[in-house]
Image (cartoon, rainbow, N blue to C red):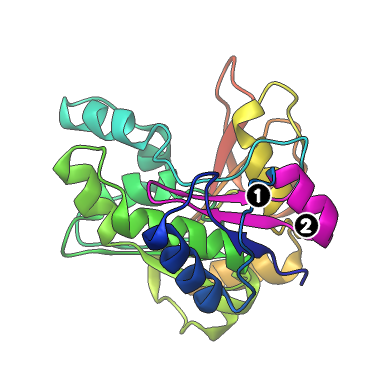
Amino acid sequence: MNLPIVTTGQHPDGESVRLATQVAGEIGTEFEPRKKRSVRKLMREYGRPVVVAGKERYEYHTNPDVKPLFFHPGLAAIRIKRLQRGGNDAMVDVCGLRAGELFLDCTMGLASDSTVASFVTGPSGLVTACEADPIVTYIVGHGLATYTDSPEEVLEAMHRIDVRNAKAADFLESCETGSYDVVYLDPMFEEAIEEAAAFAPLRSAGVHDRPDDRLFTEAVRVARRRVVLKAHYRSELFDRYGFTRIDRPNTKFHYGYIEV
């Protein structure tokens, strides 16, 4: 893997340098002083991605023409508020998710789905989230632990997520049979959607292995109750692996499930 260099924001002080040096050590890479250089110039000089370790957030720059990846809760807080008011959430409904259950998110991304699942399963449940890319894992894991600009119940849900840097199929193989109530698969980059600009940083930064037989076989083995798939409405995965499909009119993504 082409590890990024780590630098500070444009106007660093001593604390900024200390923080960026610490991040570089935790990632296992080099710290490079900013010296007023743009991120684009740093990427060109070193031929590598760049992590900007700012005091407010960490940014992961992988492509000078794409906005950086940084942690934010996305729609998780809005979805949780809707649930608190007695509304529905499509993912929660398809999963049939309940308090106290064990939920495995095989494609963490920015952990929006994991956060909602963690809110529903509560302190007596467990949400494990896998992310194959180690830098995305680091950025999102740090964000889940340190983000503050959300209601307390959302932050508590974030803090409960067990983040794992692992390819989903490899992690599933390490699990005992029936060890999670729900196994959730969201290979959202199987087919790109031009208007999904919010996904561009994650699409640029993450590892996007094409789903294969091993992933689905292991998911069925590990799930105690249900395997749930979220995929583009044109995806062949629903039929190929025998999912009961739930069509969602006027949406690009549909859900499917396998009862175990």
Residue occupying the point 49% across, 64% down: 20
Residue 236, percent from left and from top: 78, 43
Q: Residues within 10 Å of mark 2 (few under 14, many from 20)?
A: few
What amino acid is found at the position of numbered circle 1 in the picture?
Answer: Pro
Q: Identify the element where label 2 is drawn.
A: loop
Q: Is disc 1 in contact with disc 2, using a CB cutoff of under 8 Å? A: yes
Q: Residue 92's x, y, as percent?
A: 36, 41
**Picture coordinates of residue 110, whole percent (x, y):** 49, 48
In the displayed structure, 126 sits above or below 113; it is: below
Does 87 appear in magenta? no
The foreground one among 84 and 39 is 39
Instruction: Using a 10 Å C-alpha cutoff, classify the residue at mark 1 as few (fewer than 14 neighbours), some (14 to 19) or many (20 or more).
Output: many
Q: Earlier in the sequence, mark 1 or mark 2?
A: 1
Q: Which residue is at 53% across, 55% downward?
A: 8
Q: Determine the residue positioned at 26% across, 35% down.
A: 80
Residue under numbered circle 2: 210
For the record, the magenta segment spans 39-62
Instruction: Note whether residue 16 is visible.
Output: yes
Above or below, comparing residue 5 to residue 191 in the picture: below
Q: Nearer the viewer, residue 144 or 239?
A: 144
Q: Which residue is labeled 1 in the image?
A: 187
Q: Position of residue 172 (x, y in %)?
A: 56, 75
